[in-house]
Amino acid sequence: NQMLNNQNVSINSQLDKLERISNQISLLISNNDYEKISHLDRMRKKIISDMQEKNLELSTNHKSSVLKLISQNEVIISEFKNKNSESLADIANSKKCAQAYLATL
């Protein structure tokens, strides 16, 4: 029973870390700070793979936390894609402006 208790503490701390990382990634996206995002994403993937390697048994409570994190990450990814496509549209637009300007020379 002690081992199961330790396992629960470990799972809880891993899930807490994942949640903190997800929250940080959300903030960084809203600040357009993309360099730090990839570092945090690698940390997130490592925690997930560690949990998979240990083959931890998740309680119903843990499973709902994991599902919440997954949906939060999906929201983060779609925000990221939206920001990226806006940035690409801005780049394409300024490129067109530059080309139009060059055409007048």
Image: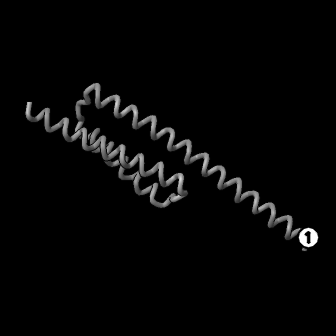
Residue drawn 55% across the image and 48% down it: 80
Residue 33, position as x, y percentages in the image: 51, 59
- Vertical position of residue 29 compared to residue 13: above or below: below
Residue at image point 55% right, 42% down: 78
Q: Dot 1 corresponds to which residue? A: 104
Q: Position of residue 76 (x, y in %)?
A: 50, 43
Residue depicted at x 55% and y 57%: 32
98 left or right of 61 in image: right
Which quarter of the picture shows residue 70? Answer: top left
Question: Tag count in the figure?
Answer: 1
Q: Is 103 positioned to the left or the right of 85 in the image?
A: right
- Give residue 93's position: percent from left, percent from top: 76, 58
The amino acid type found where label 1 is placed reads: Thr
Q: Quadrant of residue 58?
A: top left
In this picture, residue 61 sits left or right of residue 2: right
Q: Quadrant of the C terminus?
A: bottom right
Dot 1: element: helix
Task: Give the residue furthest to the top.
Answer: 60
Residue farthest toward the right in the current orientation of the protein = 104
Looking at the image, which residue is at 73% across and 57% down? Answer: 92
Residue 9 image offset from top left, x and y in percent: 19, 39
Front-lying residue, 47 or 76: 76
- Which residue ends up furthest to the bottom in the rendered image? 105
Label 1 Cα crowd, 10 Å radius (few <14 / some 14-19 / many 20+): few
The answer to whether residue 62 is above or below residue 19 is above
Q: Quick one: quadrant of the N terminus?
A: top left
